[in-house]
């Protein structure tokens, strides 16, 4: 019976390597997103003398939003790999930028990133408020506040959990 238990545990531990497929897929998605970013950037650069201030601000917010989403993908890829699959072997390369992300701090950083992305979307809606009806603006604000509340609650719970350890 002990041999069966050991076999099951080895299979479960080895199955964590299946996560690598998802992280590589996120890396490929990041590459596709980078192409999309350069396309958006080239459209903005080509219209730099045509866009008024409000349109330029909205265009810059879209680029900032894309950078935040890309950073979120990288953060999830790297920290999830490190937490759930294997530690990074730096191979002589400095990986101190990774910091010490555990599952709890990763959740807080992801929630914070989602709030930042939501803030940018809400700002874009407010700057373009004439194109939105009041219901859409109200729901966008409510959804953003739900993200903020969720991030705050997650941060509070993480703080409580860290004190219990």
Image: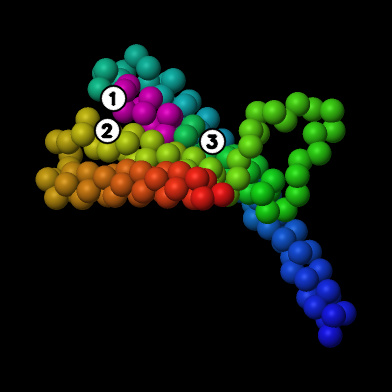
Chain part drawn in magenta? 56-66
Which disc is residue 123 wearing?
2
Q: Tell me how far mark 2 sits from mark 1, CA to CA.
A: 13 Å
- Viewer-side residue, 165 vs 128: 165
Give the percent coordinates (x, y) of residue 77.
Answer: 62, 45
Q: Residue at x 39, y 45 (%)?
A: 156
Q: Is residue 152 visible?
A: yes
118 displayed left or right of 82: left
Circle 1 Cα neighbour tier, 10 Å, few/some/many (<14 / 14–19 / ≥20): some
The reply to whether the magenta stretch includes residue 64 is yes
- Label 1 vs 3, first from the N-terminus: 1
The part of the image, by quadrant, that contains residue 46 is top left
Q: Name, please, the residue furthest toward the left.
A: 134
Q: Earlier in the sequence, mark 2 or mark 1?
A: 1
State whether residue 124 is above or below residue 165: above
What residue is rendered at 36% in x and 44% in y?
Answer: 152
């Amino acid at each position: 019976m002990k041999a069966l238990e050991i076999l099951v545990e080895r299979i479960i531990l080895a199955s964590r390597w299946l996560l690598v497929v998802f992280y590589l897929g996120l890396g490929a998605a990041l590459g596709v997103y980078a192409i999309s970013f350069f396309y958006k950037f080239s459209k903005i650069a080509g219209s730099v003398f045509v866009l008024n201030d409000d349109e330029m601000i909205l265009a810059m917010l879209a680029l900032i939003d894309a950078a935040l989403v890309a950073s979120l993908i990288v953060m999830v890829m790297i920290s999830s790999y490190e937490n759930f699959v294997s530690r990074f072997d730096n191979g002589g390369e400095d990986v101190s930028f990774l910091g010490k992300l555990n599952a709890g701090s990763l959740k807080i950083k992801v929630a914070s990133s989602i709030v930042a992305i939501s803030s940018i979307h809400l700002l874009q809606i407010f700057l373009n408020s004439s194109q939105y009806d009041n219901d859409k603006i109200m729901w966008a604000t409510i959804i953003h506040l739900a993200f903020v509340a969720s991030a705050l609650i997650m941060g509070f719970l993480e703080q409580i959990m860290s004190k219990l350890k």
